[in-house]
Amino acid sequence: MTCLAAVAAVLSLQARPAKEGHLRILYWNIQNGMWAGQEDNYDAFTDWVKALEPDICVWCEASTLYRTGTDELLPKRERYLPGHWGEVAARYGHSCWVVSAERDNYPQVVTSRYPLESVEELYGNGTDTVVVHGSGWVRTVVGGKEINLVTVHLKPFLFGYKVPKEEKTESAARFDGEYWRIREAEYIFDHTVRTRPAPDKENWLMLGDFNARSRVDNFKYRWSAYDKRFLLHDHIALHSPYVDLLSETSPEVFQATHSSDTRIDFVYVTVPVLKAVRSARVVRDSWSAGTPSGVGKFYRPSDHLPILIDIKTSQLK
């Protein structure tokens, strides 16, 4: 964890007032540490973020993995990110940052204008439950209001975790990957919202790449109501205090977050946060809208789209 302000007693600090009583949060899966951003020293990326003036950013896939313009993996010692996120974040006005989870090559990073406390990094029990890309619980205080951020990046694909190549087709037919994502979610709940007596009355956001579809978008997909690809988000709706922010604020409006024309990135919030949200939307502009790079499956700037949330802090709990 790195921050220019002291963070050891973050919850006792009175953070500076949010701009005009509002808090802006930006989430984005930036694909391999903003792979395309290496070419211009992240100038376009940091200029774009700075123009949006977010107070908090949550970045998924926040590690530089590949050499500039190629699909050649970089040795860890040569990877600029996540180690230099403090320098990148400073360019768009954020002095605080944490690596909220780094189990493998796909960490999540939070940057902020406000002090951050990394409460816990979640990787599973190492046996029957592994949080494949890790998950993090980060806490901050804005305008005297405590805000809990849970960052996630769940296992991709329909087949199960570490399934041998020759068994992947059979595993996918059983939807083992979907059941594994439910196991990841349960572990995350047990170590975040379920550690509190009344999380439904607190300010929680769980945001990230869930690698799963939701039945609330089935007006777009038109799958069977019994399709098992909906199981993860059904489970979240039934077994957590969270509600799907984009669905709640824009019902029956499909907002794709991935180049496959699917919504797999989600922002879940508790009801106190929902009541304070002024707007929530997927950002698709001339720069953020991804286009194929011609190198492997990489897009410029990302194969995902960002989500922008505006919150009226005076209405938070």
Image (cartoon, rainbow, N blue to C red):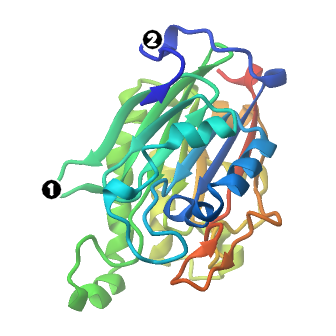
- Spot occupied by residue 260 in the image (x, y as percentages of width and height): 62, 79
- Crowding at dot 2, Cα within 10 Å, few <14 / some 14-19 / many 20+, comes out as few
Quarter-of-image position of residue 17: top right
**Point 45% across, 77% down: residue:** 71
**Point 46% across, 48% down: residue:** 108
> Disc 1 versus disc 2: distance between alpha carbons?
34 Å
- Quadrant housing the N terminus: top left
The amino acid at mark 1 is Thr
Mark 1 or mark 2, whichever is nearer to me: 2
Seen from the viewer's position, the closer of residues 124 and 95 is 95
- Crowding at dot 1, Cα within 10 Å, few <14 / some 14-19 / many 20+, comes out as few
Question: 107 left or right of 258?
Answer: left
- Residue furthest left as drawn: 127
Label 2 belongs to which residue? Answer: 9
**Point 45% across, 75% down: residue:** 228
Tell me how many marks there are.
2
Task: Name the element at disc 1.
Answer: loop
- Spot occupied by residue 116 in the image (x, y as percentages of width and height): 51, 26
Quarter-of-image position of residue 21: top right
Q: In the rendered image, is residue 241 in sight?
A: no
Seen from the viewer's position, the closer of residues 142 and 83 is 83
Task: Name the element at disc 2.
Answer: loop
- Spot occupied by residue 67 in the image (x, y as percentages of width and height): 46, 69
| Sequence-first tag of 1 and 2 | 2
Q: In this view, does 65 lie above or below 63?
A: below
**Point 55% across, 22% down: residue:** 115
Q: In the rendered image, is residue 106 in sight?
A: yes
The amino acid at mark 2 is Ala
Tag of residue 127: 1
